Amino acid sequence: MSDLLHKKNQKFYYLLIVPAFGLYMFALIIPLALGTIPSSFQKWSLLEQDKTFIGFDNYIKLFSDATFLHSLVFTIVLALFTILGTNIISFFVALLLDNKVYGKSITRSFFFIPNIISGVIVAFVWSFIFTGAIPTIADKLGMIWLAELSWFGSGGTAAFTVILVSIWQATGFLMILYIAGLQTIPKDVVEAAQLDGCTGFRKVRLIYIPLLMPTFTINLFVSIAGAFKAFDIPLALTGGGPFKSTQTVALNIYNDAFKTYQTGYASAKSVILLLIVAVIAIIQLRVTRKREVQY
């Protein structure tokens, strides 16, 4: 009966996705196909109207560009830490707040608030914490090494601040998705497992993680896309410094396109970043979907 109903309404279902598909084409596919990709094969400055076709020269040039390669390495490191950090923290926070905890609605709101605040404002708040609050508190506690630590003075500490703030901002959104996933798990499955002696971390490993694989698929996809597009927090927190050590690929592309006006070169970098994210996302989706459990 449901199959007959589906076939009968199939045209109506396709019509429902037309507005979203049209918007997607207008805002992404058409600009990418007619703008970014053709520009990546041209020598074009934003200040000049003349465009010269140069083939793959922009692509060849970027693989010997030390600044771009360093920004790519930093972006991968940032992605690894933020993807793992946000998913692990948000998963366990969701487990905690899915139970009968006093004030859990308010606590959930506190975790989610950073996600709705602009990354620039988040970066300014944390700049005050790193340069004002932490040194003051450490000084009063007699922790001189911490009071005198320059959080933005070296590449290592600056990278740590970017990773920490990125994890802090993204955790709340993923937590909400994990809570939604936990609430779809049938209570009788969990109760039956508990009656069989499956409790504690064993219950998490054998019950929650397998049954939450669809949510892991979505959250990993979201966090991968977000990590590789990191722009606002590195820009506002460190400006990509010191000495471009915390410059992400997105920030590097922005600098080429709007500071040195190498629009064609920046387009080639954008295409490479798109391909990297697409390949990683496709691999992740194939791996995690195979592990999804139907119940």
Image: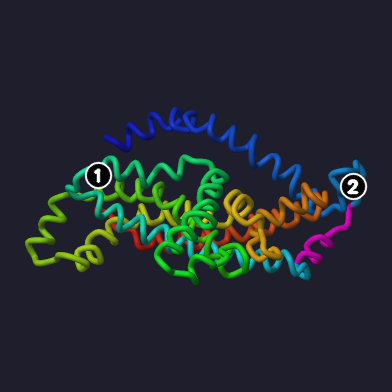
> Which residue occupies the foreground of this view, 284 or 149?
149
Determine whether 95 is above or below 15 in the image.
below
Label 1 to label 2: alpha-carbon separation: 58 Å
The residue pinned by badge 1 equals: 104
Which residue is under mark 2? 51
Q: Amino acid at mark 2?
A: Lys
Question: Residue 281 appears at what percent x and percent y?
Answer: 52, 58
First in sequence: mark 1 vs mark 2: 2
Residue 224 image point, x, y percent: 51, 57
The magenta span reads 53-62
Residue 250 lies left or right of residue 123; in this view the side is: right
Identify the main secondary structure in magenta. helix
The answer to if 215 sits in the magenta stretch is no
Left or right placement of residue 204 versus residue 160 in this view: left
Residue 57 in magenta stretch:
yes
Which quadrant would the N terminus be assigned to in this image? top left
List x then y, in percent, for residue 253: 72, 54
What's the residue at 49%, 29% (across, down)? Answer: 15
Residue 3, quarter of picture: top left
Toward the viewer: 41 or 262? 262
Camera-side residue: 41 or 259? 259
